[in-house]
Amino acid sequence: MRLLQLGFGETALRSRTIWLCGGCETCTTRCPREVDLASVMEVLRVMALEEGITPPGLRNIPLFNKLFLKNIRRYGRLYEMELIGKFNMFSFQPLKDFFKSPGLFFKGRLKLFPRFKGRKTSRPLRAPLRRARRSRAARVRPCQQRPRAGSSTPRRSRAQ
């Protein structure tokens, strides 16, 4: 947060911290200033991916993030079998969890097929997500502010 407040947006995008955030929203809940830190971290991750910035030493995290979000969009909830399979294939470790899967399956922790009723629950979310994507394309990024019309000074962000 401090890097953003001081205007070091590029440094914030290259930080490992945005990739290590689990999005549990504990920080958001406990923040005395009511800042939605989990959303800020997610926006920074999206911006970093759009600019082709990958985290140093954590090359599989953006892959997992992308596959996870696609999985949620497709089923409306997490379908672990597909996520694990795709992640292992795309990270070039196809047999990584091969010996763990039978134990999880027989304990009922891993399902072979997704529950399709999850698709119905995700439908109401799709329209607002599409609108948000369209409006995000039109917004100005915090680290790339444009000057106001008729002014030579750049706009100040809300954080300042």
Image: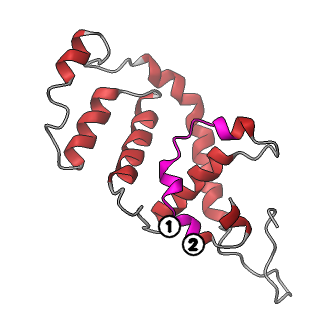
Image color mode: secondary structure
Please provide percent x and percent y for residue 33: 82, 46
Answer left or right for 73 relative to 112.
right
Front position in the image: 42 or 33: 33
Q: Which amino acid does the dot numbered 1 rest on?
A: Arg
Front position in the image: 152 or 108: 108
Answer left or right for 70 relative to 131.
left
Residue range of the region highlighted in magenta in the rendering: 10-27
Q: Which residue is mark 1?
A: 14
Name above or below for residue 42 compared with residue 83: below
Q: Is residue 18 visible?
A: yes
Q: Quadrant of residue 98?
A: top left
Front position in the image: 89 or 26: 26
Q: Secondary structure at mark 1?
A: loop
Q: Is residue 58 magenta?
A: no
Image quarter where the N terminus lies is bottom right
Instruction: Classify 10 Å Cα crowding around label 2: few (below 14), some (14-19), many (20 and above).
Output: some
Q: Quadrant of residue 89?
A: top left
Q: Which amino acid does the dot numbered 2 rest on?
A: Glu
Name the residue: 51% across, 41% down. Answer: 22
Instruction: Classify 10 Å Cα crowding around label 1: few (below 14), some (14-19), many (20 and above).
Output: some
Asked whether disc 2 touches disc 1, contact meaning CB atoms under 8 Å apart, the reply is yes
Residue 10 — which label? 2
Name above or below for residue 129 compared with residue 142: above
Name the residue: 63% across, 58% down. Answer: 136
Name the residue: 23% across, 48% down. Answer: 90
Q: Is residue 17 magenta?
A: yes
